[in-house]
Image (tube, rainbow, N blue to C red):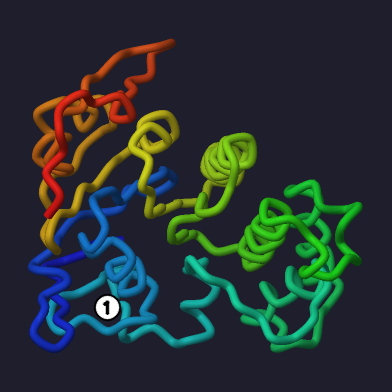
Amino acid sequence: MKIEHVTKTYRDKTVLNDVSFEVKPQSITSLIGANGAGKSTLLSIMSRLTKPDSGHIMLSGQELSDWNNQELAKRISILKQSNHLTARLTVRDLVSFGRFPYSSGRLTKADIQKVDEAIRYMEMEAKQHQFLDELSGGQKQRAFIAMVIAQDTDYVLLDEPLNNLDMKHAVSMMQIFRRLVDELGKTVVLVLHDINFASCYSDWIVALKDGEKLAEGETAKMMDEAVLREIFEMDIPITEVGGNKFGLYFNVKDKIDQK
């Protein structure tokens, strides 16, 4: 997937300005940056939920806007920050929605097998007949990820998937995303706030600031004090543990400028 010179403006505010980069196949790409950098808008444009004012998203050499809706839903899945459902659904009902591009609601044996596999992959067998409103936040998030897995797309786009998760569930979720790439050959694009999760699990990091692409590269290159200072406007010491680089942003002594 190629993002080429994408620009988006809401009223008088430019949210994205001439953003270009390429998503590497069968990898995890993390979009990082401060609040308001344009990360979620970019992800929405990459899934065709939002139309750019200018620029192009190319998928398999074809403009994203030219794809048939049903065929595109077999190639790209997206999970947004908030998933509000008014209907009272069980986990299995939700996961079955992932097969809609293939079955239009009439599940075949092949669809049922995909649903079973997704539930098993997310270790939700014991919860599959429970209603979503009976689950914890972490369990509910796993159910939504199972739905995305059942959709069986090449590209999986996830907007802040660690929101409201405790440390244990956040780590578990990142391990799952890594497995989606390493075991199932998916291409995963994440919006993340925690640079340390991006460092430990990503193959590639793209940094946005004020709607522009500030930098991109492999994690080792991006986890650099000068690069992070430019992105986040604060000094973040870097340390290395077990081959992973960590930013020690939680213990910065100097006063941080509040804009």
Q: What residue type is labelled 1?
A: Glu
Residue in the image at 80% along x and 46% along y: 123
| One can see residue 207 in this view | yes
> In this picture, is 229 found above or below 72?
above
Residue in the image at 41% along x and 52% along y: 190
> In this picture, is 50 found above or below 185?
below
Residue 196: x and y in percent read: 38, 32
| One can see residue 110 in this view | no
Residue 101: x and y in percent read: 62, 81
Residue in the image at 70% along x and 60% along y: 140
Query: Which picture quadrant has residue 159?
Result: bottom left
Which corner quadrant holds the N terminus? bottom left
Query: Which picture quadrant has residue 170?
Result: top right
Residue bearing mark 1: 63
Element under disc 1: strand
Query: Which picture quadrant has residue 222?
Result: top left
Between 43 and 115, the residue placed more toward the observer is 43
> In this picture, is 23 found above or below 40?
above
Q: Is residue 208 left or right of residue 35?
A: left
Residue in the image at 13% along x and 44% along y: 215
Residue 102: x and y in percent read: 66, 80
